Image: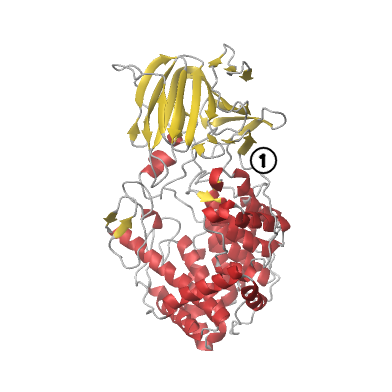
Amino acid sequence: MQQIKVWCSAVMVVATVTSMAAGERWPGTRLLVTPQALADVPAKVANHPWAKQLLDDMLAEADRWVGRPVDPPTTGGGWPHNYVCPKDAGRLEFREDSPHRHWCPRCKTFYEGEKLDAVWINSRHMNFAVAAEICGLAYRLGGRTDCADWSRRVLLWYAEKYESFPINGEWAGRGRVTCQSLDEAVWLIHMADAFDLIADHLSDADQETIITRLFLPAARHIEQYRFGVHNIECWQAAARLMAALIGRDDALRDRAIGSLRKNIEAGITDEGMWFEGAPAYHTYTMMGLTPALLTARHNGIDLGPTDKLRGMYTVLSHLALPGWQIPALNDGGQTSLASMAYFLETGSYLFDDAELKQQLAWIYQSKLGSRTKVSIRQNPLVLLYGPAELPTKASLDLGSRLLKDTGLAVLRHGGYTAIVKAGRKSGWHDHADRCQLILADEKQTWFDDLGTSSYGHPLYLDWYRHTASHCTVMVDGKPQATDAMGEFVRFETAGNCPTITVRCGDAYPGIVLTRTVAIVDGLVLDRFEASSDTEHEYAFLLNAPGEFTCNIKPAGGDSGTSSHLKLGSESLAALAANANLLNGDWKEASGRLGITASASSAFTAYTGHVPGFPGGQQRSALALVVRGQRAVFTAAYVSDSGTDGAGNARCTEVSVSESGEAIFKTASGKTHVLH
C-alpha cells in the first residue's frame, strides 16, 4: 500500500474575514448555512413539491434519531476498505443492528471478523455526526428544539471523550474517533455544521467545552497529517478551516486557506478534471471542496480564481457513456452523470453560472433522472442553495473532445463513443493502463474500465489496477508503469473518419506503445503498435461482457502456451498458435460486438473468463500474443446497434502491411488504412 509522507507548508494566506475576539460567542449560521438561505426555504416549500418533499424527508430522518440514546461506540473505527466480500470483491452492506455479522447481498452470506467489526464502528461514528447535522437542520427549518437538544448531547458526548480516544489507524493519516485523519476530517465537517446550526441553543459553557475539547484538538490532530496536493488534503483543509473559524484560531485558519488555494491551483487540470484522473476521486474531491467553498464565501475568504472550479462541475459530462455512466478510470468505482446533480445545485449558487443550471436541468428533465432515482432533488443543501427555478428546456453538448491536460481523448461518431487514454502524472491512484481503449455503442459499453474493488481485497492490486484488466497491450506479462506520461499525436474530428493517435514511451523501459483509433463506415478501427530494440512478448488484451466465440478452434496439445496470461485469478486458454486472422463476437442479451483482428506476424489467441466489475459478473477476455522486437495488432469492431448505414457489416479483411500499415477492407468494397 501507499506510504504517504507528512507534508508541511509555510504558505500563509491572509483572509479577508474579520476574526472574532477570543472568548466571544459563536453566533451560528456562518459556515455552510446563512440566515438568508434559511429565510428563502418557506417560499420554496410553498411553491415547489420537490422542496416540500425534501423538507418532509429531512424532518422524518431527524425524528428517526431524536428519540434514540446518544451512545456512540467508545472505541475508534476501522478502515472502510476492509468492508468487502472476500468472494466477489463487492462492498458489504452496513446493518446498524449487526455489529459482528456483516452481510453480502450478492452471495447471501454473513462474514465475521475484528476488521469488519471495526469498520462497523467507523460507520456508527460517522452516522452520529450526520444525524447531529440533520437534527440541526430540523431545528433551523422546523423549529424543533428537541432536535437541537439531541445534537447538543452528541456534540458534548464527543467533546467530553475526544482526547481519551487513542490515536488509531494505519493508512491515510491517523484518527482518534475514526480510522484515519481523512475520515476524521469528514466526520468533523458534519460535526462543525451541526454546531453552527444549533449555536444559539448552546450555553456559553457548552460552546466553550465543545470548542476547546473537540474542534480545536481534532483540527490540530488532523493537521499533523498533511498531504500536499491530494483529495485527502482538500477534506482535511476544509475541516481545519471550519474548526479554526469556530475556535478563533487565526493561524490555523490561514494555514488551511493556504492549503486549499494550493490544491485548487495545482490540483485541477485546465479542463477542470481533478489531477488524479479518477472520476470517483474527482467527485470525492468536490465533496470535500464544497463545504470549504461555502464556508469561504460566507466568511469573506478568497480561495483564488474560480475558472478551474467551474470546470470541475462540467468536465465529467464529456466522458458520458450509455446510461450516462462515467468510466471508472483509475481508482474508485462506477459513477453516473446523475451523481453530479448535488454539486451542480451548490455550484449554481456559488458561481451563479447559467451553464451549470442548464446541465442540472438536463439531468432532471432527461430519462437519466428517472433511471437513477434523481427525478426529485435530494440533498438538504439543495433545499437551501438549489435554484428555485430551472430552465424549462435544457440540452447537453456531447461531442468529440480532446482533454489534453487530463490525458484523455473522446471520439463520438456514427453511434459510437471511443475514449483513448494517453495518460498524465496522476499520482498514487493511477492505473497501469496507457493507450487503453474504452468503447461503447448507443446501448451499452463493451470495452470498459473496471475501476477498483475496495483496497482491502487482493484483486485490487492483482487485477483491477493491473494492465491485464484494461484493453491495452501488456509486455512480458508485467504491468505497465503507473504515473507514465503519454502524448497525443493526432486528434482529428472533421470529416467522416474522426481519428485519435496516442503514444507512450514511459509505460515500459525501452518500449514505445502507439495506438490509433478511427470511426468510419459503421466500424471502429484500431491499430496498436509496440516496438523495442529487444525481443518481448506482446499481448493485445480486450475484455467485454457476455460470452466470446470465434472461428478459431481450441489448439490441441501444448501449442500456444504462455506463462504470462494469468489475468486476475483466471488463466486464459489457448485457442490456436500461428493464427493469421480472427473473427469473433461478444454476445449478450442487449446486443453483439463483432471483431475481426490480425497482427504483423502469426499470433497465438487465448480466451477465457476474467473478473468483472467488483461485485458483478465475470467478463470474457481475448488476448492476441506476438513475440518479437515489434508487433502491430489491428482490429475492426462492429456493433449491431450502430446507427450508420453500414453499421452491421463486418470487415472482410484485416491485415498489416510490411511497413506496418493497418489495412481494413469492408463488405462495401472500401479500403481504410491506419498508419
Location of residue 616 by image quarter? top left
At which x and y percent is residue 359? 66, 54
Count of numbered tags: 1
At which x and y percent is residue 98? 30, 65
**Looking at numbered disc 1 in the image, what kind of residue is underneath it?**
Gly
Q: Is residue 256 visible?
A: no
Residue at 65% of width from left, 59% of height from top? 261
Give the colouring mode of the picture.
Answer: secondary structure
Location of residue 652 by image quarter? top right
Mark 1 lies on a secondary structure that is: loop
Q: Is residue 590 left or right of residue 401?
A: left
At which x and y percent is residue 62? 47, 76
Residue reaching furthest to the front: 645
Crowding around mark 1 (Cα neighbors within 10 Å: few <14, some 14 to 19, many 20+) is few
Residue reaching furthest to the top: 658
Q: Is residue 507 visible?
A: yes
Residue at 53% of width from left, 86% of height from top? 201
The residue at which mark 1 appears reads as 399
Location of residue 490 by image quarter? top right
Q: Is residue 532 left or right of residue 387?
A: left
Position of residue 500 relative to residue 662, above or below, is below
Residue at 56% of width from left, 77% of height from top? 196
Nearest the camera: 552 or 129? 552
Nearest the camera: 287 or 521? 521
Residue at 53% of width from left, 81% of height from top? 139
Position of residue 176 relative to residue 477, above or below, is below
At which x and y percent is residue 422? 58, 35
Which image quarter is the C terminus in?
Answer: top right
